[in-house]
Amino acid sequence: MTLDDILTAAPVLPVVTIGAAEQAVPLARALLAGGLPALEITLRTPCALEAVRRIRAEVEGCQVGVGTVRSDEDLDRAAQAGARFAVSPGLPPGLGQGPLPLPLLPGVMTPTEAMAAAERGYTRLKLFPAREAGGAALLQALAGPLPELRFCPTGGLGEDDLPRFLALPNVLCIGGSWLAPAAALERGEWAQIEARARRAVAIAAGAPAAPATPGGPSAAGEEDPGAAITEPRP
Ligand code: 3PG
């Protein structure tokens, strides 16, 4: 699969920091069941690569990638663990210069960074941190002068952001950690994670993002998976 295939398979790329390798397989199964076949495991915990290995071995249909990649050594380790793709918050000179062992989605935050990445051949980019960088308005502004670029905006986003980002011609999907927060992983709340995934897919398909009850869930990191969504709006 190409990076485009992976990033357009679903509207959301869940970003997950795994606390224990045992969480990996039920997490990936929950996201897959909820309609999200791709996920990014950040290299911020010691068990991250073991989590990738377990998902590759046990969860058919899941496209697992590695995030928070900072060096070519990280890329090699990710590829050896079986990752399908890699994501970085930036694109420093020492990252991704040689032949890549797996597709890389580097991060940018400004027009100059996006143009420098494109000069190096990277036209699929993570906009990070997306909210602070300017969000959907920034991406809309970039679509005119840099129409060949495609983005996965990530950082500070939640399900409410899906409609406005996905309406842009240069957005492949949006990334975010709200689907599988650390507390949910620790408590093994797989059904809730699946429900969050299902809800995000429904919102992306046009269902209203607002919760059914006042004060209910809708923003990143809140507890309830959001039972408000039943059917996508026609
Ligand atoms: C990250 O690498 O932390 C991602 O960009 C996730 O950002 P978020 O936690 O704000 O969704």
Image: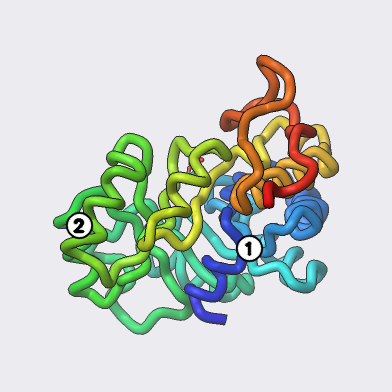
Labels 1 and 2: the sequence-earlier one: 1
Q: Residue at x 49, y 74 (%)?
A: 3
Secondary structure beneath disc 2? helix
Furthest toward the front, the residue is: 234
Q: Nearer the viewer, residue 131 or 74?
A: 131
Left or right of 182 in this view: 137 = left
Q: Quadrant of the N terminus?
A: bottom right
Furthest toward the top, the residue is: 214
Residue type at the position of mark 1: Ala
Badge 1 is on which residue? 38
Residue 90: image tag: none
Q: Residue at x 79, y 33 (%)?
A: 227
Q: Nearer the viewer, residue 99 or 199?
A: 199
Separation (CA) of disc 1 from disc 2: 26 Å
x and y percentages locating residue 160 in the rendered image: 54, 36
Secondary structure beneath disc 1? strand
Left or right of 168 in this view: 2 = right
When the figure is inspected, residue 57 is found, relative to residue 169, above or below; the finding is below
x and y percentages locating residue 213 in the rendered image: 73, 19
Q: Nearer the viewer, residue 200 or 188?
A: 200
Q: Is mark 1 within 8 Å of ligand 1?
A: no
x and y percentages locating residue 177 in the rendered image: 57, 42
Badge 2 is on which residue? 113
Residue type at the position of mark 2: Glu
Q: Residue at x 76, y 32 (%)?
A: 228
x and y percentages locating residue 51 in the rendered image: 70, 58
When the figure is inspected, residue 27 is found, relative to residue 144, above or below; the finding is above
Specify the quadrant of the image occupied by residue 209.
top right
Q: Residue at x 81, y 33 (%)?
A: 187
Specify the quadrant of the image occupied by residue 156.
top left
